[in-house]
Amino acid sequence: MGASLGKLVVGMTALERAARALWIASGKRAELWDAQPTALWRIEMEKERPIYLDQARAVLLAIREPSEGMVSDRVIRAHGYAGDIDMVWQAMIDAALSEKPE
């Protein structure tokens, strides 16, 4: 993924930022995602944006369960956290999934 994701737009949900990153990684121009609504923008984005939001949602659902390495004792000790870190991770992903794109 050599393409830069550029400046993330303030006010986007995590899901929208992920969808935008997938959009850019697929070779599309960030300016089109970020553009103000015009006739061209509406035509392109009404069909494309939901696809990328669905893909981003699928990614978040896929990583909802932390890997063993993410919750290993070494990681927990390194960050000084002794709580139920996998529940915190899941809660954060759930919160990202529940945000409504604008």
Image: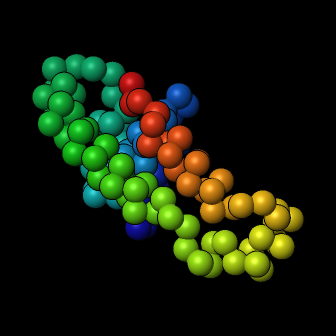
Q: Place residue 84 in its image quadrant.
A: bottom right
Query: What percent of the width, then of the height, locates residue 50?
Result: 24, 39
Relative to 95, 30 lies left or right: left
Quadrant occupied by the N terminus: bottom left
Query: What percent of the width, then of the height, locates residue 100?
Result: 41, 30
Foreground pick, 53 / 98: 98
Q: For residue 88, say whether it is visible.
A: yes
Query: What percent of the width, then of the height, locates residue 62?
Result: 40, 62
Q: Establish if 5 lies above or below 42.
A: below
Q: Place residue 32 in its image quadrant.
A: top left
Q: Place residue 97 in its image quadrant.
A: top left
Q: Establish if 26 lies above or below 101.
A: below
Rendered residue at 29%/52% (across/down): 55
Relative to 7, 87 lies left or right: right
Q: For residue 22, say whether it is visible.
A: no
Rendered residue at 69%/78% (across/down): 72
